[in-house]
C-alpha cells in the first residue's frame, strides 16, 4: 500500500471510478474491502460512519465474528497510507473522515454548479454555461464507479447522478439563453433517448430543433415525448411542454429568446426581502434545487426543519427568490407554529388568507374545511405558484394547504420534524460549518476583524446563525469594541445567552418559544437533562435522571429530537447544542427546586457508578468488588466484557463528569468508588492521565473520609500510572506511602500489591535487583493469602527481570510456570503477560522466530481483551523482532500500529520512542 507525504493532501475522486490521487498519481489503497471502506467514509465525510455500517457494507449480514477488529485494522492501514494527521478520526460509534471541500471532486462539482445556476438566475448566460461546463468536465464515469451498487453508497451515487443530469439541463438552458440551437440538437437527441421521462430535455430538444429551422421535427419530438410519457409513466405532458408545443405551432418568437409580453393579470409577490448577507448552505440549496428539478412532473413539496435560530426562514426565503422567476405568483404566510403572542393559525384561517391572496372573493370561499381545501387545490391547478408556509406547528396544520398538481412549488419550515408529511425533499438544517459561520459574522459585522477572535466568537455562538447575527450586530453597533473584546465577554459571561440579545432579537427567547410548546412531561425531562453532568446521554441515563421507565425515556428523547431541542449524533446517543444546554440548565434552576435537582443528579451519578462498577467487574472478574450503597435507579445491563468496553467507550466522558459532579457535591465515597470503577477501563485503553486525575481526587476524598485502606489503594494505583509516564520519583513516593498504610491497616493483599507495583516502578528504572526483592516479598504474601492469580503475575515479572539480568534459563522457568498456572485458572490476562515475557526471553537468546510466535500469541489475547494499552507495547516488541529477522516492512507496520495506538491514548512520549525506530 503506497504512502502519502503529509505535505501533499490527497485528492478524493468519486465522480467516476473511486480514486485517491497525490500529485496526479493514483494511490494504491489495497484490496476491494479497504477501498470500499474509504469510499463509505468519503461519502459520509464530516459525519460519523458507525462500525456497524462499515461491517454491514463490507460483509453483509454474514459478517465474521472478528469483523469489528478487521475494520479497525483497515482504518489503521488507511491512516498509514493517507499519512495525513487527524484525517480519519476515531469516534465512540465509529470513524469520521475530515476532508476540506476542495479535495473532493464532488464538492467542487456542487460548488461550480451552484455558481453556474446563480449566474443563470442573474442573466449571465455565457458565464453560467462556462461554470456548468467546467463542473461537468470533473466527471469520469458513474459516481463511485464499481461501488455505486453497494447498498449504503447507492443513495449517494444516485444523488450525484441526479445533480449531474440537472447540471446538464442547466448548461443546455444557459447555452440556449446565449442563442445556441443547431449545436445542441445531436446531444439532446441522445439525452432524450437515455432519459425519456425528463420533460425538460424534450422541451430543450424542441426548442433547439425549431431554432435550426426544423419545425416539423420539433413537432414530431413532442409527439414522441407524449407517447413515452403516457405509455411508460402514465403521465400527460406538463403544461410547460404543451406550451412549447403551442409556441412551435404558432412560430412564437419567444422560442428565440424574445421576452413575452407582460400578462394582463398582475403577479402576486408576498415574499419577504432576501437577506443581503446570506452565507453558506450551498449543499442544502443544491438539494432543494435538485428535488425541484427532478420533481417537475409530480407535486413538489420541500420541508425544511431545524432548531430555533438555525436559519430555516432565511434559507427558504433565499431559495424562493432564487426560484421566483419560474412562478407567476409568490405567496408567503406565517403559520405561527411557534409564537408567544398568538396561537398557531388553523388550516381554515390559513386557506382563507391564501385564497384571498390569489384574488378569490370572500363570498366564494366555502365554510366547509374539505371544500375550502379543494378550492385551494383547484386554484393552484390553473396557476404557477410558489407557496412558502413558514413556521408550521405540525403536519396536520399544513396538510390541507398542499397543492394537488405539479405546477406549483411548496416550501415549508418548522421547528419540529414533519415526519408524517409526504414531501419530495426534507432538509434538516444543522448549524453552520466553521467557514460559513465566519463568513456570516464578517458579513454582518463589517470589516475583517481579528481572525482568531472571530473564530472564537462563532464557536462560543455554537455556529448558530441567529446567535452569530446577534453577536455581529452588537459588534457593529459598538465601534469601540473589537472581536477579541466580544469573545472575552461571551467567554466570561455566566451564560453566553445573556450576551446574545440585540433589540427585539434574543437567542434565549427563541429557545423559550420552543420550550413553551412542549407538554409537561417533555418540559420536565428537558429541564432535568439541563443538569445532566456529561457531554451526551442515552435512554438509560435519562430514565435514571428523570425517574421514569426506559420506554418512556426513549419516547421523550425521540420527541425532543423531533422538536429539534436535542441532537442524535449516533443511534441511541443524544446531546444538546451548547446554547440549548445553557437554556435547559437555566430553566432547571428557575423551575426545579434545589432538592429535586439534587435528587435527580444523585440518581444519574449513581447510575453511572453502578453501571461502571458492574462493567469493571466484567473486565476483571477476579478483582475483589467494593460495597456500593443501594441506588434509586437501575444500572445498564451489561452481558459480558465486550459490552462493558463498548459502554465505557461510549460513556467515558459521562462517567468522568459524574465523578466531577460528585466531587462538587461532596459525595466523597462516590468519588473514590468512581475512580475504582474506572480503573480497569482506563488501564486497558491507556487513559493514564485520566486515571491519575480520578485517583488524585479519590485520594483526597478518602483522606476526608479517614479511610486508610482506600488511601493505600489510591496511592498504589497512582504509583502504577505515574511510572510509565517517566515520573519515577512521584511513583515511588506514592508506592512507599501505600506500603506503609497497607501495613498499618493489616491489609496483607494490599501490602503484596504495593510490593508488586513497586517492582513495576523499579522496572522502569532498570533496577532489577530491587525488582526481584519486592517480587519475592509479594510472592510470600500472596502465597500466605492464597491469592494465586497475583502470584502468577509476580512469577511472570520475575522471569522478565531474570532475562534482563542475563539469567535466561531461570527466567524461562518462572515464565513457563506462570503460563501453566494461568492456563489452569483460565487467566487470559496472565497468559498474555507471560507470553510477552517469554517473547522477550526468546529474543534475548537469539531465537527470534520463537519470540515472534510468543508475541503474536500475546497480541491475539490482548486484542481479545480489547486492551489497547498492552497491545501497543506488544506491537512495539513485535516490530523489534521483525527487524531482528530482517523483515523491515513488517517491522514498520507493527511499529506504526503501536504509534497509532499510543497517540490515540495521548501517550505521546511512548509513541515518539517507537517512532524513532522507523525510517
Image (spheres, helix red, strand yellow):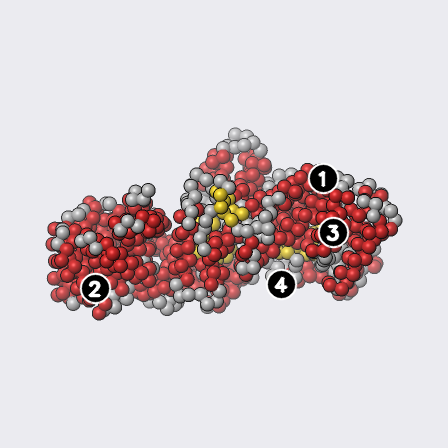
Q: Horizontal placement of 636 versus 449: left or right? A: left
Mark 3 neighbour class, 10 Å CA radius: few under 14, some 14 to 19, many 20 or more: some
Instruction: Tell me the number on the disc at residue 189.
Output: 3
Pair 3/2: label in front: 3
Instruction: Tell me the number on the disc at residue 413.
Output: none
Pair 3/1: label in front: 3
Q: Which residue is mark 1?
A: 125
- Position of the C terminus by quadrant: top left
Pair 2/4: label in front: 2
The reply to whether dot 1 and dot 2 touch (C-beta < 8 Å) is no
Instruction: Tell me the number on the disc at residue 819.
Output: 2
Residue at the image position 44 percent from the left and 53 percent from the top: 30
Secondary structure found at label 2? helix
Secondary structure found at label 1? helix
Q: Is residue 146 visible?
A: yes
Secondary structure found at label 4? loop
Mark 1 neighbour class, 10 Å CA radius: few under 14, some 14 to 19, many 20 or more: many
The reply to whether dot 3 and dot 1 touch (C-beta < 8 Å) is no
- Most distant residue in the top direction: 480
Amino acid at each position: 500500500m503506497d504512502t502519502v507525504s503529509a505535505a501533499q493532501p490527497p485528492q478524493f475522486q468519486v465522480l467516476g471510478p473511486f480514486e485517491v490521487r497525490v500529485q496526479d498519481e493514483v494511490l494504491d489503497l489495497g484490496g476491494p474491502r479497504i477501498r470500499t471502506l474509504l469510499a463509505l467514509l468519503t461519502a459520509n465525510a464530516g459525519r460519523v460512519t458507525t462500525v456497524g455500517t462499515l461491517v454491514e457494507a463490507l460483509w453483509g449480514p454474514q459478517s465474521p465474528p472478528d469483523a469489528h477488529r478487521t475494520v479497525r485494522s483497515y482504518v489503521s492501514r488507511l491512516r498509514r497510507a493517507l499519512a495525513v494527521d487527524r484525517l480519519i478520526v476515531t469516534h465512540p460509534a465509529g470513524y469520521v473522515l475530515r476532508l476540506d471541500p476542495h479535495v473532493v471532486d464532488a464538492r467542487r462539482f456542487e460548488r461550480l454548479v451552484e455558481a453556474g445556476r446563480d449566474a443563470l438566475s442573474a442573466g449571465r448566460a455565457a458565464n453560467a454555461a462556462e461554470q456548468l461546463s467546467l463542473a461537468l468536465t470533473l466527471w469520469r464515469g458513474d459516481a463511485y464507479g464499481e461501488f455505486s451498487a453497494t447498498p449504503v453508497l447507492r443513495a449517494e451515487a444516485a444523488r450525484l447522478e441526479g445533480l449531474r443530469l440537472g447540471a446538464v439541463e442547466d448548461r443546455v438552458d444557459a447555452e440556449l439563453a446565449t442563442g445556441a440551437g443547431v449545436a445542441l440538437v445531436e446531444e439532446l437527441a441522445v439525452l432524450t433517448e437515455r432519459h425519456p421521462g425528463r420533460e425538460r430535455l424534450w422541451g430543450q430538444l424542441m426548442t433547439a430543433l425549431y431554432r435550426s429551422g426544423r419545425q416539423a421535427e420539433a413537432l414530431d419530438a413532442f409527439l414522441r415525448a407524449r407517447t413515452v410519457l403516457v405509455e411508460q409513466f402514465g403521465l400527460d405532458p406538463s403544461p410547460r411542454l404543451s406550451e412549447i408545443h403551442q409556441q412551435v405551432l404558432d412560430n412564437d418568437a419567444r422560442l428565440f429568446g424574445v421576452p413575452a409580453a407582460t400578462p394582463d393579470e398582475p403577479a402576486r409577490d408576498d415574499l419577504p426581502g432576501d437577506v443581503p448577507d446570506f452565507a453558506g448552505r450551498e449543499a442544502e440549496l443544491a438539494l432543494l434545487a435538485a428535488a425541484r428539478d427532478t420533481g417537475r412532473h409530480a407535486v413538489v413539496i420541500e420541508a425544511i426543519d431545524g432548531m430555533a435560530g438555525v436559519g430555516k426562514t432565511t434559507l427558504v426565503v433565499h431559495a424562493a427568490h432564487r426560484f421566483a422567476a419560474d412562478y407567476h405568483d409568490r405567496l408567503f404566510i406565517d403559520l405561527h407554529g411557534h409564537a408567544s403572542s398568538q396561537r398557531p393559525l388553523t388550516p381554515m384561517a390559513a386557506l382563507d388568507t391564501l385564497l384571498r391572496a390569489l384574488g378569490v372573493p370572500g363570498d366564494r370561499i366555502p365554510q366547509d374545511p374539505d371544500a375550502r381545501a379543494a378550492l385551494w387545490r383547484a386554484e393552484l391547478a390553473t396557476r404557477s405558484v410558489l407557496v412558502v408556509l413558514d413556521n408550521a406547528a405540525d403536519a396536520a396544520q399544513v396538510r390541507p394547504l398542499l397543492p394537488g398538481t405539479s405546477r406549483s412549488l411548496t416550501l415549508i419550515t418548522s421547528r419540529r420534524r414533519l415526519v408524517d408529511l409526504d414531501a419530495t425533499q426534507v432538509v434538516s438544517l444543522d448549524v453552520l460549518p466553521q467557514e460559513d459561520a465566519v463568513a456570516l459574522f464578517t458579513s454582518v459585522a463589517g470589516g475583517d476583524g481579528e481572525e482568531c477572535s472571530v473564530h472564537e466568537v462563532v464557536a462560543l455562538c455554537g455556529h448558530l446563525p441567529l446567535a452569530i447575527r446577534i453577536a455581529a450586530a452588537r459588534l457593529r453597533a459598538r465601534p469601540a469594541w473589537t472581536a477579541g473584546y466580544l469573545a472575552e465577554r461571551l467567554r466570561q459571561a455566566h451564560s453566553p445567552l445573556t450576551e446574545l440579545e440585540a433589540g427585539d432579537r434574543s437567542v434565549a427567547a427563541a429557545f423559550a418559544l420552543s420550550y413553551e410548546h412542549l407538554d409537561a412531561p417533555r418540559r420536565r425531562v428537558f429541564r432535568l437533562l439541563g443538569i445532566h453532568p456529561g457531554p451526551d446521554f442515552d435512554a438509560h441515563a435519562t430514565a435514571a435522571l428523570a425517574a421514569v421507565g426506559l420506554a418512556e425515556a426513549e419516547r421523550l428523547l425521540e420527541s425532543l429530537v423531533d422538536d429539534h431541542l436535542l441532537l442524535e449524533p449516533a443511534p441511541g446517543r443524544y446531546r444538546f447544542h451548547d446554547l440549548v444546554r445553557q437554556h435547559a440548565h437555566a430553566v432547571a434552576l428557575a423551575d426545579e427546586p434545589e432538592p429535586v435537582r439534587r435528587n435527580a443528579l444523585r440518581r444519574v451519578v449513581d447510575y453511572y457508578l453502578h453501571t461502571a462498577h458492574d462493567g469493571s467487574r466484567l473486565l476483571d472478574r477476579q478483582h475483589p468488588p467494593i460495597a456500593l450503597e443501594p441506588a434509586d435507579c437501575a444500572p445498564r445491563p451489561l452481558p459480558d466484557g465486550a459490552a462493558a468496553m463498548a459502554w465505557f467507550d461510549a460513556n467515558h466522558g459521562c462517567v468522568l463528569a459524574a465523578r466531577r459532579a460528585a466531587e462538587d457535591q461532596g459525595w466523597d465515597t462516590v468519588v473514590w468508588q468512581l475512580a475504582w470503577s474506572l480503573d480497569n477501563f482506563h488501564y486497558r485503553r491507556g487513559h493514564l492521565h485520566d486515571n491519575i486525575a480520578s485517583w488524585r481526587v479519590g485520594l483526597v476524598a478518602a483522606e476526608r473520609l479517614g479511610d486508610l485502606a482506600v488511601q493505600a489503594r489510591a496511592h498504589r494505583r497512582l504509583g502504577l500510572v505515574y511510572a510509565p509516564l517517566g515520573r519515577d520519583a512521584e511513583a515511588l513516593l506514592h508506592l512507599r506511602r501505600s506500603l506503609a498504610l497497607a501495613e498499618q491497616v493489616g491489609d496483607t493483599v494490599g501490602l503484596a500489591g504495593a510490593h508488586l507495583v513497586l517492582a513495576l516502578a523499579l522496572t522502569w528504572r532498570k533496577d532489577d535487583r530491587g525488582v526481584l526483592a519486592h517480587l519475592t516479598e509479594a510472592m510470600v504474601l500472596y502465597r500466605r493469602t492464597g491469592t494465586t492469580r497475583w502470584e502468577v503475575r509476580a512469577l511472570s515479572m520475575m522471569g522478565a527481570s531474570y532475562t534482563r539480568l542475563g539469567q535466561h534459563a531461570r527466567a524461562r522457568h518462572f515464565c513457563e510456570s506462570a503460563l501453566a498456572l494461568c492456563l489452569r485458572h483460565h487467566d487470559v490476562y496472565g497468559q498474555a503477560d507471560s507470553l510477552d515475557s517469554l517473547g522477550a526471553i526468546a529474543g534475548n537468546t537469539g531465537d527470534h522466530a520463537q519470540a515472534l510466535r510468543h508475541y503474536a500469541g500475546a497480541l491475539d489475547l490482548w486484542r481479545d481483551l480489547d486492551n489497547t494499552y498492552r497491545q501497543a507495547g506488544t506491537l512495539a516488541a513485535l516490530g523489534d523482532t521483525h527487524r531482528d529477522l530482517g523483515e523491515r516492512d513488517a517491522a514498520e507496520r507493527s511499529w506504526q500500529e503501536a504509534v497509532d495506538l499510543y497517540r490515540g491514548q495521548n501517550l505521546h512520549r511512548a509513541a515518539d520512542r517507537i517512532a524513532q525506530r522507523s525510517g
